[in-house]
Image (tube, rainbow, N blue to C red):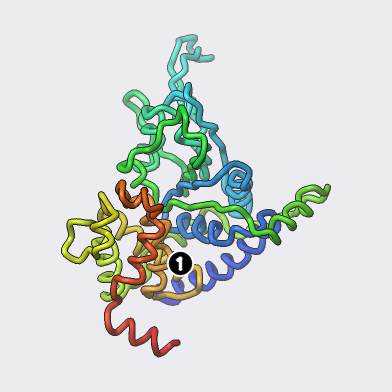
Amino acid sequence: MSDDEREAQAIRGLAAAYGRMREEIGKVIIGQTDVVDQLLIALFSRGHCLLVGVPGLAKTLLVSTISRILQLSFRRIQFTPDLMPSDITGTDVLQTDADTGRNVFQFMQGPIFTHMLLADEINRTPPKTQAALLEAMQERHVTVGSNTYRLPSPFFVLATQNPIEQEGTYPLPEAQLDRFMFNVVVKYPTAAEELRILKQTTGGEEPELKPALTGAQILALQEVVRKVPVAEHVFIYARDLVRATRPDDAIAPDFVKKFISWGAGPRAGQYLIVGAKARAILEGRFHVTSDDVKAVAHPVLRHRIVTNFQANSEGIGPDQVIDKLLATVPIEVKERAKTLARG
């Protein structure tokens, strides 16, 4: 079997596994389909997610459910003002060697040594502890003293922020927010979904979940995602979409110059392309379209553009600006022709 045939087979396998994952997650999590899709896209893109939503929307349950379906280890850290970096990364502990009787330092791993880590209310801990977590997210290893310890693979961090009760918190600076691939907004369920939640969660029956993928399969599929081809006009569209968020750029629309203080950097374009690749693969396609880029634009860009006072006074947030950008930034002519032909 050739490499192309193996990759095509892997894509079909991932698309089938994606359907099974959504079905299994649906046994526990009602609604939140966009949130589930974005988390899985980030996972297969080797990215991390920041979840923003009020308490009680099943964020912890969602992450633990995904870890069970994918047969990955899972840990949760509740961030508090007194949490220290070593509480996350681990530390050297003095112990007595049973054979020699000498005292030696032995590294005790912290909770970050897991496949899926839920960093609950990350904005409630001081910047020093936040930085320790974000450094490990970026480098995928932990350094204690003179020793470096690799984190497990795959490694996926899902941090949460509470949009209310900001008193006594340490909001993440924009430069650190940029380390998260996606900013995922978890909204309230619909009336019908909430009724199903009440019926499903107040009984005694617990759903039985079936595994969909292993850690080794996830690593292999992450490699396949990187190999998905992208046409030149899709690269151009992602580039133009990012550049249009910068108020001092020549292609920025007037509303961006009016409402935006700072736009997105090059990392946003990288995540638009990688996220679009993962979305295409999950849908069983080995090619990326501009629609894939549009589908991941909100979670990629909403925490990378900074609105100014005028936007805030008029009730205009990043999502409204992104909506306008998606309607304004032109797609390359050939792609528009294909879209019209499909319609």
Image side of residue 201 versus residue 127, left or right: right
Q: Report the number of discs.
A: 1
- Image vertical order of residue 63 relative to residue 111, above or below: below
Residue 254 location in percent, x, y?
A: 24, 63
Label 1 Cα neighbours within 10 Å, binned few <14 / some 14-19 / many ≥20: many
> Left or right: where does residue 57 sit relative to residue 278?
right
Q: Residue furthest right?
A: 204
Question: Which quadrant of the figure contains the C terminus?
Answer: bottom left
Query: Residue 54 or 240: which is nearer the viewer?
Result: 54
* Residue 64 locus on image (x, y percent): 61, 46
Q: Above or below — where is 43 with respect to 254?
A: above
x and y percent of residue 339 in the render? Answer: 39, 84
Which residue matches tag 1?
Answer: 279
Q: Is residue 262 visible?
A: yes
Q: Work out whether residue 128 or residue 321 is closer to the camera in this orientation and state it.
A: 321
Q: Is residue 287 left or right of residue 113?
A: left
What residue is rendered at 37% in x and 61% in y? 322
Rendered location of residue 268, percent (x, y): 31, 56
| Quadrant position of residue 338 | bottom left
Q: Work out whether 246 lies above or below 234.
A: above
Q: Vertically, is 68 above or below 147?
A: below
